[in-house]
Image (cartoon, rainbow, N blue to C red):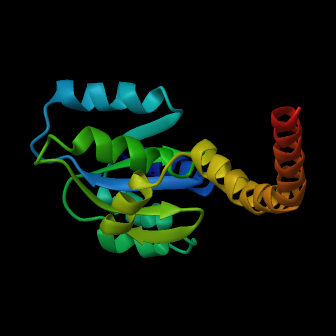
Amino acid sequence: MDRAQKGTTIAALKSKLAGARGAVLTDYRGMSVAELTELRTLLRKSAVEYAVVKNTLAKLAVKDTELASLAGYLEGPTGIAISRRDPVAPSRILISWGKNRPTFTVKAGMVEGQLVSAAEVQALADLPSREVLLARLAGTFQAPIQGLVNVLAGPVRALASVLDQVRVQKEKSQ
């Protein structure tokens, strides 16, 4: 690779990382080409790009950016999954795909500009989806209102029950 190609590669990687909402660094050691192709296909369905990077070029790409802390994880064979839409999508897909592959490991990640460790990437992957979290939040807001409605309806319900018992008593006495 000549100097011009290296400069182009560094600029391309820098622009991809600058627009990324989420990125995960992986060690793909021991993986076959077929497995990597399967992973890329799975990631592409969620608008996540996966690329094998040269560590020296990647270190130059992240140098003097907010992602400079990723440079410490750029050792050994490195692949990077980048998402511009969902910051958690790379974590979720890579963790679920790599469960049955002991040679595939996650090194670290970046979510919304913050460095996250491999354990934190795992924790992000275990989080429920955004829709589920929003539904739980709506349920949390709704619970006190339902409680209030039940409390306010209690006296009305009691009055209706008393009136019903009075009606039953009158029917028995006639």
Q: Describe residue 9's horizontal placement relative to residue 36 as left or right.
A: right
Res 16 seen here: yes
Measured along the vertical axis of the image, is residue 123 above or below residue 165?
below
Total labels drawn: 0
Name the image quarter holding the N terminus.
Answer: top left
* Residue 1 appears in view: no
Q: Position of residue 61 (x, y in %)?
A: 48, 61
- In the rendered structure, the answer to whether residue 76 lies left or right of residue 84 reads left
| Residue 5: image location, x then y, percent | 43, 44
In the image, residue 40 above or below residue 157: above
Q: Quadrant of the C terminus?
A: top right
In the visual, does 169 lie left or right of 62?
right
On the image, the x and y values in percent for residue 114 come to 53, 70
Vertical position of residue 121 compared to residue 72: above or below:
above
Left or right of 101? Residue 71 is right
Image position, residue 62 (x, y; %): 48, 66
Residue 156 position (above or below residue 173): below
Most extreme residue toward the front is 174
Quarter of the image for residue 129 reads top right
Between 22 and 75, the one lying in front of the other is 22
Residue at (20%, 29%) from the top-left corner? Answer: 35
Instruction: Look at 20% across and 44% down and name the residue there.
Output: 99
- Residue at image position (25%, 32%) is 36
